[in-house]
Amino acid sequence: MGEGDMGMPGSGSHADNITMKGGGYYSLATKGAKDVIDGATPLVSQALSQMTLGSTMRPFTAADMGCADGGTSIQMIGDILAQVRKTAPQRPLAMYYTDQPGNDYNALFQVLNGGTAIKSYLGELDDVFVYASATSFYKQILPPESLDLGFSATAMHWLSQKPCNITTHIQAVGAQGSELRAFSDQGRRDWETILLRRANELVSGGHLVLVNFGVDEAGRYLGNTGGRHMFNIMNDIWQGFVQDGTITPAEFEAMTLPQYYKTVDEFTDPLTNRSSPVHQAGLRLDHIETRVVRCPFAEGFRAHGDAAAFAEAYIPTIRSWNESIFFGALSSDRPLEERTEIIDRYYGTYQDMVRQDPEGHGMDYVHAYIIIRKE
């Protein structure tokens, strides 16, 4: 997405094609992702309140896993580090930003060091040490028992690998039968892997606050909250490109997003099932809730009524998290210029659709907000 801050896998089928649009574009185009993170700030503060912060001189270590360019989380992180500093003024603060190797770390450090219009907490707090790690959250990122607070938002729906192509749709929400089971199984294995890696990193009493795309109790998920179905629209446009000869059936199938949206039960099972490796590793569920955060661009349209302005603002937020995957689905036998033209026409088609008939379009965010502690 990132969408929010996205930490994509670094291996698996087509995984190398997955990257957030760089150069600071991501934070500029994804206001909704920042709204999601800002809404999680009280939960992060709640997690901190359960920790004994002032009993050691060891650096307080936090991590933003799947950070993208850092802009969507920087305000929240600054607020949280300030809370730690107030409670434990003697402790140095170590902040780790992590994402896949293809992430735009130049943009991250520009944001952190005040090189953009986004306000940074650096310079406002003393004794803060910032690091970056080009390591997927499917691997262990930090040394054992060194992490006090782990955070991730809008990232862990990306799978470590694509288990199969989906023959009739671009996303698992449209999958059926054995294809859907393959994605469900991959999602279960990947969630367990993520949690076990964090269990190794966390100190005793450490906490995770994870804000993940999911399916809520009403069956809603990203872009499917009562208006037009975003993923079906994207699929229909791509299928239309097959029908008019723009792309081949093989290219249609290759454009399968390596994502899976878990239900609340799927999120909680490894944390509450006493026989699971995650539970045995000491991780416990403290809190889970689902929330819908409304698409800021659709909300803006309801206020200003300018369909063209809505379409022009809305499509880039979609493009920011899936353009590289659409591009990677196209045959490398096509000249680069031709592939670029196809991708531009794809998003242009979607933008024209929204401009001509804007009602019901929007990308509402549906997340599970989770607090986990290590016993």
Image (cartoon, grey):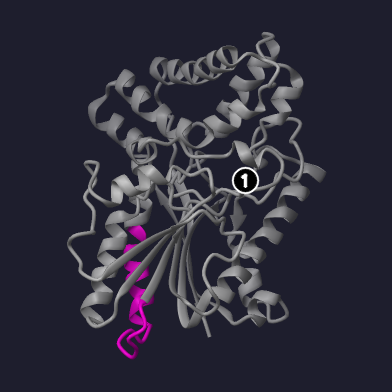
The image shows residue 147, relative to residue 137, as above or below, that is below
Q: Quadrant of residue 255?
A: top right
Give whichever of 366, 339 is nearer the camera.
339
State whether residue 10 appears in this view: yes
Using residue 51 as the reference point, say whether residue 304 is left or right of it.
Answer: left
Which residue range is magenta in the image? 39-59
Residue farthest to the bottom? Answer: 55
Q: Quarter of the image holding residue 279? A: bottom right
In front here: 86 or 125? 125
Instruction: Inspect the image, locate mark 1, and give the three-letter code of the amino acid beneath it.
Output: Gln
Name the residue: 29% across, 80% down: 91
Give yes or no for residue 354 being in the magenta stretch. no
x, y percent for residue 219 = 57, 50
User: Can you tell which quarter of the image residue 57 is in?
Assistant: bottom left
Location of residue 15 in the rendering, given as x and y in whole percent from the top left corner: 64, 42
Farthest right residue?
178
Would residue 130 be found to the left or right of residue 20 on screen? left
240 w.r.t. 63: above or below? above
In the depicted structure, whether residue 101 falls above or below residue 65: above
Residue plotted at (36% across, 42% down): 107
| Count of picture labels | 1
Residue 135 falls left or right of residue 205:
right
At x 76% / y 23%, what residue is drawn? 250
Q: Is residue 229 visible?
A: no
Q: Secondary structure at mark 1?
A: loop
Indicate the position of residue 215 as horizontal and vertical percent values: 57, 52
Residue 109 place in picture, x, y as percent: 33, 49
**Does 51 lie within the magenta span?**
yes
Q: Pointer 1: what residue?
A: 259
Asked whether 77 or 232 is in front, the reply is: 77
